[in-house]
Image (spheres, grey):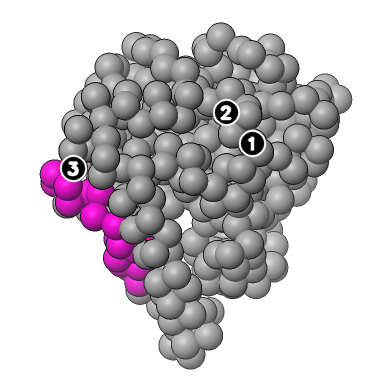
């Protein structure tokens, strides 16, 4: 099996520049420290805007290839698709979100995923309301899938919610270079954005806001058009391989402790490193930001749901929070060994 071009797409062009700088530095540090034999794979930073000097210094140590790209016309979530514009050095791409830590060698993925296949893991919750999914599929002229998925915002068991259309987390995506995936993904995103009030409707659904209290500003996530693009490609015979959980570890895995933190090859930290205002604050090597998110998610989602019970906090929330304490020495090592030298240079 062939190698991957590993690509992240940090956005240094806007107000989140410092957050992306912190995330990129931790990603590069984790790649240097833990990627093992997969460090032989080409590593790319497809940057939106010019990268900061500390990022350039650590990227050089990681032998990463830097390219600079303009913002995507379809919004911030479409910026990720700039990653497909790199000059390829292998037959396929492994596109990663920037807020990821690599915790072990990724080489096994080369054997798990066939050269001609697309791979991604399932989303953990509904992205938008069922009627919007139906409208999107209708506008695309596609027959909706019959499969449904669980909503882990409501429960940690594997029971399928009959109202939830299948979707995939786009934080870790493997695909052959030259696949029609990227063009379909862009086209379907444009169709979703053309649905009247689509951003507001998605925001109201995801945040539980009423029509009288709409969110002030919203972007349409890339996951629904990613799901419809995969659905169409699979109907055309495109091989698809579900991504093993250990290669996109997220909050649900911490709650279930399956996989446990020490079994994860990729830990998708989502909104971590968003706490604080300065780079120094965002780089502070603790796991408190993620622990706050676990607590907030439990309080806002589970305890408000009829199926939630306080004893679940003892069975799931407390162990997940304790599990994250094991992350702190990892962050401290990455900071001391790889990040502090380039930030202070």
Question: Element under label 1?
Answer: helix
Residue located beneath label 3 in the image: 279
Confirm whether residue 154 shows in the render: yes
Q: Which residues are magenta?
A: 277-297
In the depicted view, which residue is nearer to us: 3 or 94? 3
CB under 8 Å between discs 1 and 2: yes
282 falls in the magenta region: yes
Q: Residues within 10 Å of mark 2 (few under 14, many from 20)?
A: many
Task: From the image, tell me which residue sits under label 1.
Answer: 38
Identify the residue at horizontal 18%, vertical 38% (top origin). 344
Which is nearer the eye, 172 or 326?
326
Q: Earlier in the sequence, mark 2 or mark 3?
A: 2
Placement of the N terminus among the 4 image quadrants: top right
Residue 74: percent from the left, percent from the top? 40, 19
Task: State the separation of the CA atoms marked 1 and 2.
Answer: 9 Å
| Identity of the residue furthest to the right in this view | 237
Q: Identify the residue at horizontal 49%, vertical 61% (top origin).
A: 251
Residue that appears at 37% across and 65% down: 328
Which residue is label 2 attached to? 6
Mark 3–mark 1 Cα distance, whole angstroms, equals: 29 Å
Query: Marks 2/3: CA distance?
Result: 25 Å
Q: Residues within 10 Å of mark 3 (few under 14, many from 20)?
A: some
Compared to residue 174, the image places residue 108 above or below, namely below
Q: Residue at x 48, y 24 (%)?
A: 63
Quarter in which the C terminus is drawn? top left
Observer able to see residue 137: no
Q: Report the magenta stretch's main SS.
A: helix
Taking the image as shown, residue 248 lies to the left or right of residue 306, namely: right
Say which of 105 and 308 sits in front: 105
């Amino acid at each position: 099996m062939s190698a991957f071009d590993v690509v992240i797409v940090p956005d240094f062009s806007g107000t989140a520049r410092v957050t992306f700088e912190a995330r990129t530095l931790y990603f590069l540090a984790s790649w240097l420290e833990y990627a093992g034999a997969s460090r032989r794979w080409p590593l790319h930073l497809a940057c939106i805007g010019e990268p900061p000097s500390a990022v350039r210094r650590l990227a050089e140590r990681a032998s990463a290839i830097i390219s600079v790209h303009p913002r995507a016309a379809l919004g911030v979530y479409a910026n990720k698709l700039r990653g497909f514009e790199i000059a390829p050095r292998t037959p396929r791409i492994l596109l990663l979100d920037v807020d990821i830590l690599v915790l072990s060698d990724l080489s096994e993925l080369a054997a798990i995923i066939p050269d001609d296949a697309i791979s991604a893991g399932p989303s953990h919750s509904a992205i938008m309301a069922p009627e919007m999914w139906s409208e999107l599929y209708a506008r695309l002229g596609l027959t909706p899938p019959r499969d449904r998925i669980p909503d882990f915002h409501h429960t940690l068991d594997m029971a399928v919610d009959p109202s939830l259309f299948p979707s995939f987390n786009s934080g870790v995506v493997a695909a052959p270079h030259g696949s029609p995936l990227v063009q379909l993904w862009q086209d379907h995103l444009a169709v979703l954005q053309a649905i009247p009030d689509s951003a507001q409707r998605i925001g109201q659904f995801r945040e539980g806001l009423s029509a009288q209290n709409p969110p002030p500003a919203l972007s349409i996530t890339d996951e629904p058009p990613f799901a419809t693009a995969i659905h169409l490609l699979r109907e055309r015979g495109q091989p698809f391989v579900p991504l093993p959980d250990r290669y996109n570890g997220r909050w649900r895995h911490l709650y279930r402790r399956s996989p446990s933190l020490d079994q994860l090859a990729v830990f998708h930290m989502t909104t971590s490193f968003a706490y604080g205002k300065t780079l120094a604050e965002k780089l502070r090597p603790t796991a408190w930001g993620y622990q706050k998110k676990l607590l907030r998610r439990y309080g806002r989602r589970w305890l408000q749901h009829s199926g939630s019970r306080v004893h679940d906090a003892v069975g799931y929330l407390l162990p997940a929070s304790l599990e994250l304490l094991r992350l702190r020495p990892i962050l401290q090592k990455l900071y001391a060994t790889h990040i502090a030298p380039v930030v202070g240079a």
